[in-house]
Image: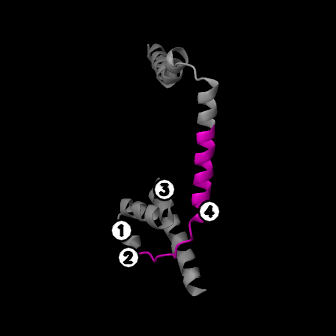
């Protein structure tokens, strides 16, 4: 009985995962060569613009972490890691590692 239920669940999951691609393959109008070329050009221009924006950003001065950051709740530390170090951490260990590395890096820059 459990095997049948599990098989049905896997089947439903597979249908759900493939639904959008199947729907677009059956019902979406095909793009003309002009539209394909225009989309390719737009993607290339956007990628070029993004690359230039990243290259143009000046490295910002490291701002020090607030005192007592280690005593904060880990969700607060997670937000701090995103703000200060630009790290999207999934758990407390990753957060503390990222903030400690950021603090060491900021300390090295301040000492230099």
Where is residue 2? Give x, y as percent.
44, 17
Label 1 or label 4, whichever comes before in sequence order? 4
Is 86 above or below relative to 58?
A: above
What crowding class fits label 4: few (fewer than 14 Cα within 10 Å), some (14-19), or many (20 or more)?
few
Q: Which residue is mark 2?
A: 68
Q: Is residue 53 magenta?
A: yes
In this view, the residue in front, 51 or 20, is 51
Is 78 above or below relative to 8?
A: below
In this view, the residue in front, 95 or 36, is 36
Contact (CB < 8 A) between labels 3 and 4? no
> Which corner quadrant holds the C terminus?
bottom right
Q: CA distance from mark 3 to mark 1?
A: 17 Å
Q: CA distance from mark 3 to mark 4?
A: 22 Å
What's drawn in magenta, residue-wise? 41-67
Q: Which residue is mark 1?
A: 72
Q: Which residue is mark 3?
A: 88
Q: Which mark is residue 55?
A: 4
Q: Give the number of the mark in front: 2 or 4.
A: 4
Q: Is residue 9 magenta?
A: no
Label 3 or label 1, whichever comes before in sequence order? 1
Q: CA distance from mark 2 to mark 4?
A: 34 Å
The answer to whether one can see residue 13 in this image is: yes
The secondary element bearing badge 2 is classed as loop
What crowding class fits label 2: few (fewer than 14 Cα within 10 Å), some (14-19), or many (20 or more)?
few
Q: Give the number of the mark in front: 3 or 2.
A: 3
The residue depicted at 56 percent of the width and 71 percent of the height is: 59
Contact (CB < 8 A) between labels 2 and 1? yes
Label 3 or label 2, whichever comes before in sequence order? 2
The secondary element bearing badge 3 is classed as loop
Where is residue 31? Give x, y as percent.
58, 23
What crowding class fits label 3: few (fewer than 14 Cα within 10 Å), some (14-19), or many (20 or more)?
some
């Amino acid at each position: 009985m459990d095997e049948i239920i599990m098989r049905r669940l896997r089947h439903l999951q597979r249908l759900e995962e493939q639904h959008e691609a199947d729907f677009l393959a059956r019902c979406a109008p095909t793009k003309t060569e002009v539209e394909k070329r225009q989309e390719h050009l737009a993607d290339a221009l956007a990628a070029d613009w993004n690359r230039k924006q990243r290259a143009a950003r000046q490295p910002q001065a490291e701002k020090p972490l607030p005192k007592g950051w280690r005593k904060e709740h880990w969700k607060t530390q997670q937000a701090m890691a995103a703000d200060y170090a630009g790290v999207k951490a999934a758990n407390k260990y990753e957060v503390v590692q990222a903030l400690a590395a950021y603090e060491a890096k900021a300390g090295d820059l301040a000492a230099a």
